[in-house]
Image (cartoon, rainbow, N blue to C red):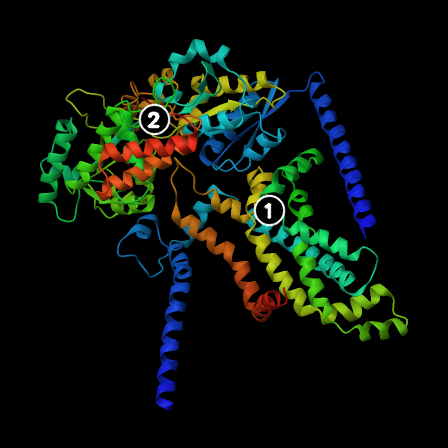
Amino acid sequence: MKRYSIMILVGLLALSIIVSGCGNKGASNTGANDNEKGKPAEISIASWNLQADALEEAAEKFNKSQSEVKVNVRRVSNSYDSIVPALTAGIGAPDIVAVQMRDFANFMGKFPDQFVDLSDELMPRKDEFSDAGWGASTKDGKIYAIPVDIAPTAVYYRKDYFEEAGINPDNLTTWDKFMKAGKKLQSKLDGVKMTTFSLTSNETYDFWQMIANQLGGRFYDEQGKIDFTNEANIKAMKLVKELKEKDLVVDSPSWNDRVRAVVNGETATIVYPIWWAGTVKTQAADQAGKWGIMPLPAFTEGGPNQANLGGSVFAVTTQSEHPEAAWKFLKYLLLTEEGQKIQMDYGLFPAWKPFYKSESFATVDKYFGFSLAKRFSELATDIPAMKFGEHFYDVSRPLETAFGQILNGKKDIKEAFKDAEKAASKASGLPVSK
Amino acid sequence: MNNKKEFTKILVYIFLGLGLVISIYPFYWMLTASTLNEAQIFKTPPKMIPAGNFLDNLSMLLDQMPIWNGLFNSLFVSTVTTASIVLLSALAGYAFSKFHFKGSKILFAIILLTMMIPYQVTIVPLFIIMMKLGWINSYKALIIPYLVTPFGVFLMRQQMFAFPEELIESARVDGCSELGIFFKIVLPNMLPACAALAIITFLQQWGNFMWPLIVMNTQEKFTMPLMLSMLVAPGQVTKYGPIMVGSVIGIIPIAILFIFFQKQFVSGMFNGSVKG
C-alpha cells in the first residue's frame, strides 16, 4: 500500500513540473513578440460598469490617434475579485487598475510592490487636482495613483416644500438654522421630515463621514496613530445625534430606503454627493424641476462647508511590461480636456481642476434646470483630504459600532469613540493617539 | 377523535399555506417589479399588480448588458460541464465500486481528500495555470477545470454499490465488452442517480459566480450571474426594473429544469443525504 502512495506522489510531482515548465516557455514567448519593432505596445486597463463604458470610448479614440500604444479595456467587478488573485499570483494583472479611493491605501498595504511610483510625473502637477482626490494615493511622500473622479457633496432640497413652508435656502448657512427651518417645515407639512439618512444601520457612517470631512475630521494624527476623539469627529457626531433627537430625520437604513423616502416625498432634503443626481433623475423622474441644490450648512457662519464621499484612482501595476505606454494613456485620459470630456459624458466628476473651466461644465441639466457640474465645481474648491489609511476597514468598523451605541443612547459620544479607538487599535495594530 | 384529527390537519395546512406564501412572495414580486417603472417599484404601499413596462425594462437592460449573450454563455457552459461531469463521474464511480484493482482505495481516498481543500485555496494556483495556458477570457477556462468533480465521483460510486454484481457477471459470461456492459446495462439502470447528479451540477454551474468573475473580462463573455451582479455598482444609478427582467430571464431555465425533473430533484437530494 505504502509504495503506491509514494509512486502517486512522485507522479503528481513530475506532472506539475511538466505543466509549469511548459507554462514558462509560453510566457517568455509572448514577451518576445511584444518587443518586436513596429508593433504597438499593448496595455490593458481594468474597471467596472460606467467607468469601463467611458474607458472603452476613450481607448477607441486614443488608439486611433496614435500608433505606438494600443489600449484594451477589461471589465471587472467593483469588488476587485478578479484583480486580487492576479496581484496575489504576481501574474496576469492588467497594466492599469481602477480602485475606489478609500480602498487604495488598503491595496498599497496588501501589495506593497505591485504599483509603479508615479511621483516624477505627478509631483509637479499635484496642485492641478482637487485635494479631495489625494486621500489615498500617497505613501512615504511618493505618489502611487492618479486621482480620477471625486464626489463633492451638497444638500439636495425640494424647492416646492421649501416654498410651501416659507424657507429660503440661501439663509440656511449653518446647521442650527437648518434645524430651525426643519422644525418649521415639519409643522407645516404633514408626513414630511427635514432630511433622511440611516439611524439604525452601519450606513450611518456615510452621513457622518461627509459631515466630519466638512470639518476636517480625521482617523489618524500626524504620526499615523489612531485618533477618533478629535474635535471635528465629535462635533460631527453631535450633529448626527441632534438631528435624530430633534426628530428631523426619516430613518433610511439602506440605500433603497433612501430612494423610497425620496420617491414618496417623505423627505425635504437629502445630503449626498453629485452621484446621487442620477438616482433622483431615474427613480423620481416625475419630480423633475422640483429639486434644488445648496451647499452644506456650516457649523459657524462662514465656516467650512465642503465634503467628499467617493471617487476613484488609477494605478499602474509593476507587472506591466509597458509602464510608459500606460502613463501615456493616463495622461491623455486625465490630463487633457478631450479625455476628461469623455468621462464627464458618462457622469464622472473629474478631480482635475483645469477642466472645471471648460464648456462641458456649463451644460444645463434638463431635470434640475441648471448646470449640475458647475454648481458642484463651486463646492469642490476646498474639500479637505481625508486619509483612509492601509487599515481602513479595521478603522471604520469600530466607528460604525460606536455610532450605533451613541444613537441607541447606550454610550455618550466621547466614551463610544474612545472604545472604538481601542477596538481599531487592536484590529489594525496601530497605536492610539496620546 | 376524528374531529381532533381534522383540526390538526387544518392547522398543518394553514401553516404550510403560510410557508408557501412566504416562499413564493419574492418570486411574485420579482415578476411584478419587472413590469413596473422605477417610481412604481419604490412606491409605498407597493404596487402588487403587474403594469406594462416589461419591454421598456428589457430594452434598458439590453442597453446595459448583452443579456442574450449571457444566457447563451451560461447555458453552454452549464450544459457542457454537466454532461461531462455526469459521464465521467459515472465511469469513475463504476470503476471504483465494481473493479478491485491495486491502489483503488488510495486513489479514491485522494479524490475524497481534494473535496476537503477549501475552494478559496485553489483560486490563485488555478488562476496562474489559466494565465500560463493563455485561457483567460475563454470558455476553456470555465469548462476544463470542471470536467469532473470529486463530489460526482463520490456520489456515483455510492450509487453503483447497489447495482447487482450478478448482472455484470452474466453479461461478461455472455461475451459483452466492458464498455458495452457499462453503457448497455449499468448506465440505463443508473439513470435516476445520473439525473440527480445532473440537476445538482447544473444548478451549481448555473449559479457559479466567483470563478467566471475571475477569469472572464469582456462583457460578451460574461455569464448570467456576472451580468446581473454588475448592474449594481457604487456611484452609479441602480435601475431595478432591468435587474428584475434579468433575474426573470435567469430563472427561466432553472424553472423549466425543475418542472421536468421535479421527481428526481427530490429523490436525488434524499439519495445524496442518506447514502452519503
Image location (x, y in percent) of residue A235: 21, 28
Residue at 45 percent across and 34 percent down: it is A50
Q: How many marks?
A: 2
Whether residue A345 is visible here, answered yes or no, is: yes
Q: Nearer the viewer, residue B40 or A17?
A: A17
Circle 1: element type = loop
Q: Is residue B208 above or below residue A73?
A: below
Q: Chain of mark 1?
A: B
Q: Which residue is mark 1?
A: B118
Apparent side of residue A8 relative to residue A401 in the rendered image (left or right) = right
Q: Which residue is mark 2?
A: A219
Give amino acid for label 2: Phe
Q: Is residue A298 above or below residue B263?
A: above
Image location (x, y in percent) of residue A263: 26, 46
Give amino acid for label 1: Pro
Q: Quadrant of the C terminus of chain A?
A: top left
> How far apart are labels 1 and 2 at the CA level?
36 Å
Residue A302 is drawn in which quadrant?
Answer: top left
Image location (x, y in percent) of residue A68: 62, 17
Q: Residues within 10 Å of mark 2 (few under 14, many from 20)?
A: many
Image location (x, y in percent) of residue A55: 50, 28
Residue at 69 percent across and 56 percent down: it is B85
Q: Nearer the viewer, residue B62 or A101?
A: A101
Q: Is residue B17 above or below residue A367?
A: below
